Image: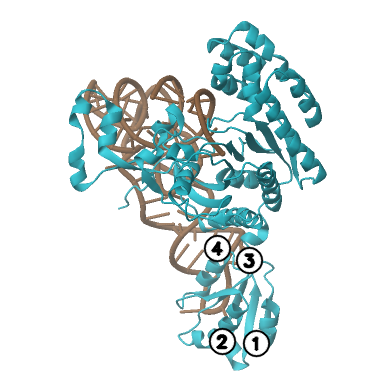
Amino acid sequence: MSVKVSIPKGTRDFLPEEVKKRNYIFTRIREVFELYGFEPIETPSFELSETLMGKYGEEGDRLIFRILNSGEKMKKADIEALSAENLPRFANSLSEKALRYDLTVPFARFVVQHQNELSFPFKRYQIQPVWRADRPQHGRYQEFYQCDADVVGSDSLLCELELIQIFDIALSRLLLPGFTIKLNNRKVLSGIAEVCGEKEKLVDLVTAIDKLDKIGEEGVIQELTSKGLSKTAIEKISPLFSFSGNNLDKLNFLREFLKSSEVGLQGVEELHFLTDIIEKFPLSRGILELDITLARGLNYYTGAIFEVKAHNVKMGSICGGGRYDDLTGLFGLKGLSGVGISFGADRIYDVLTALNLFPVELVNEKKVLFINFAASTYLHAAPLMIALRAQGISCEIYPTQAKLQKQFKYANDKKISYVAMIGEEELKNNSVALKNMLTGEQRILNHSEFLKILC
RNA sequence: GAGGUUGUAGCUCAGUUGGUUAGAGCGUCGGAUUGUGGUUCCGAAGGUCGCGGGUUCGAGACCCGUCUUCCUCCCCA
């Protein structure tokens, strides 16, 4: 009689092979973060509700997983709020903690709380799971990992430069053949709003422009109209929809278009600085592309905005990031500028799978299984296993004297590349039979030959 | 949060206008083979047909509710 088992929606189990592949991704990213001087931190998986609530826009709060009070605290439930249909207040009375929604807001809290122990500019990386009560979809889960690197306490554009290089090197090390690093600047977007006289409609303007490649020029105009932008303003923006060319052409165009906006021109100069220096020190496999339609939802970005898309695969962005001038201001620490990036490990996994880019050695490492023939087999196998492990070769002995068929099937299922046998025949002349599970070839060897072949 | 979609063995799926005892492939286990896996042959186990209610002489199939799956929005990695 079996019980029906399952896991909550939007979550996943990982089999050994998947964990190895995921760890491969995390390791490559981590090693590049460290190459650029970023240091690891960790924060709790749950925070006080007040730390998280209200930090992700109107929609955000709905997507935060809340932790129900337990024990005596349940008595704090505000029944009056419930009967008055004030659901947010009722929810707050039931819960004081919530699972983290991203790594950036907890990091801001961390910086404010530990400001006296940190040396600025502070460069940290953090690879931990986050949780969102989102509706699961292709490539979207309720529990997933983020790999973040941020610099806080410096407004130098060299930070942006290094983060672009980190995108490039990490993804190149993951053997991704082609990808585009899209770059924009929030100041340019502000400048556009300013030039067309709709400064206060910046957010509507930006989210509409962001959808250009998805809904087309007509769709954007329709959305802008429905948001109440004036016809003259929309006409003024329309050249932006169709302009093209290389990065230099785009910069020249923007300089002209934004000539009446001080902040806009400042954004253009920031973009120019970055494209210019990347030209002098070219990227490895990535292509840097200016994209003024790039906005991203997060409303705390104030300067650079990044997004990375893999070539030749149907998948949303695999990385993102940007500069946020006043993030720690939310927690009372003013004047600290930050810039950061995030790798979407789960999506990178899907891309590497779709393009078949995981190295084969990941699953087919050199490993050895010793067949268990008798109670005394261990005594004969142990010296060889000790020697193999000392050389970093992983090996094991089958724990019971099962039928050979079963022991070989175990090796086969576990993709173990060699099976070693020390049975009665081998004991007579102090030898080992070694079978290569890939080719099926089997050889009788003395101990030193055995170790020589495997190490 | 809105709209659509899905659910039958561990997995992938058949199952006729409602009709006797719900099937297949793969996987698992056992045997052919007590010193050889991946190939082959034989056999076996495994199902409250997502859950609850309703219609009917009779429901895996029809109706209602609920949960779940996947998809499109919103938003995001």
Name which residue type carries label 3: Glu
Tell me the colour scheme of the image.
by chain
Q: Are marks 1 and 2 in contact (CB under 8 Å)?
A: yes
Q: Would you identify the image quadrant in which residue A450 lies? A: bottom right
Q: Are marks 4 and 1 in contact (CB under 8 Å)?
A: no
Determine crowd level at label 3: few under 14, some 14-19, many 20+ residues with C-alpha closer than 10 A.
Answer: few
Camera-side mark, 4 or 1? 1
Q: Is residue A101 left or right of residue A322?
A: left
Q: Provide the secondary structure element on which disc 1 rests.
A: helix
Q: Is residue A388 above or below residue A272?
A: below
Badge 2 is on which residue?
A: A383
| Badge 1 and badge 3 both on one subunit | yes
User: Label 3: chain?
Assistant: A
Q: CA distance from mark 4 to mark 1?
A: 27 Å
Badge 4 is on which residue?
A: A413
Chain A drawing hue: cyan
